[in-house]
Amino acid sequence: MKTYTATPADIEKKWIIIDAEGVVLGRLASIVAMRLRGKHKPSFTPHMDMGDNVIVINADKVQMTGSKRTDKKYYWHTGHPGGIKHRTAEQILDGAHPERVVTQAVKRMLPANRLSRKQMTNLRVYAGTEHPHEAQQPEVLDVKSMNSKNTRSA
């Protein structure tokens, strides 16, 4: 029995589109991260970029459970002494770039290395329903119907 290792010729990338409206952020991010890495494929090879190209639409309508929307803080540092700053998830989602919440959640679910930075280039997140990737004929992945916990009940 030999261990299978995929070669660049074996890699087949698809285009996947996911509607994030009403989906819980963490569950969405874990599914997207798995698709970006290619772990859903039986030919998964850890050191190769095997994942699909993922398009996430309606990122501004993503849900958070509990009081995370008001309490969760995203920190950054300006580089100056005492320059720690933060914004809440609500401020970001209501601001000019709500797609950054989804992008950051997916990025933090991938390993911190060169390969994951390359895999992140296969992710496209859009706040609304419009996207310029119709020519790629993406397949729809219905995250809501995968598990009843993927959607937040009011």
Image (cartoon, helix red, strand yellow):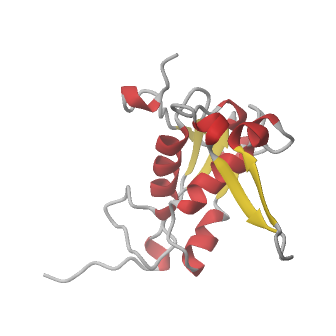
Vertical arrangement, residue 113 with respect to residue 145, above or below: below
As drawn, is 132 to the left or to the right of 27?
right
Vertical arrangement, residue 4 with respect to residue 138, above or below: below
Does residue 79 appear in this view? yes
As drawn, is 66 to the left or to the right of 91?
left
As drawn, is 148 to the left or to the right of 65?
left
Looking at the rendered image, the quarter that the N terminus falls into is bottom left
In depth, the one of 53 and 26 nearer the eye is 26
Where is residue 82? Give x, y as percent.
82, 70
In depth, the one of 125 and 84 nearer the eye is 84
Does residue 131 appear in this view? no
Where is residue 152? Give x, y as percent.
49, 25
Question: Residue reaching furthest top?
Answer: 154
In depth, the one of 66 and 9 nearer the eye is 66
At a point 64% along the width and 35% down the height, the residue shown is 69
Where is residue 30? Give x, y as percent.
47, 50
Vertical arrangement, residue 39 with respect to residue 21, above or below: below
Question: Residue reaching furthest left?
Answer: 1
Where is residue 106? Give x, y as percent.
57, 55
In depth, the one of 105 and 80 nearer the eye is 80
Q: How many marks?
A: 0
At a point 81% along the width and 45% down the height, the residue shown is 97
At a point 50% along the width and 37% down the height, the residue shown is 141
At a point 51% along the width and 65% down the height, the residue shown is 110
Vertical arrangement, residue 46 with respect to residue 138, above or below: below
Question: Residue reaching furthest front?
Answer: 82
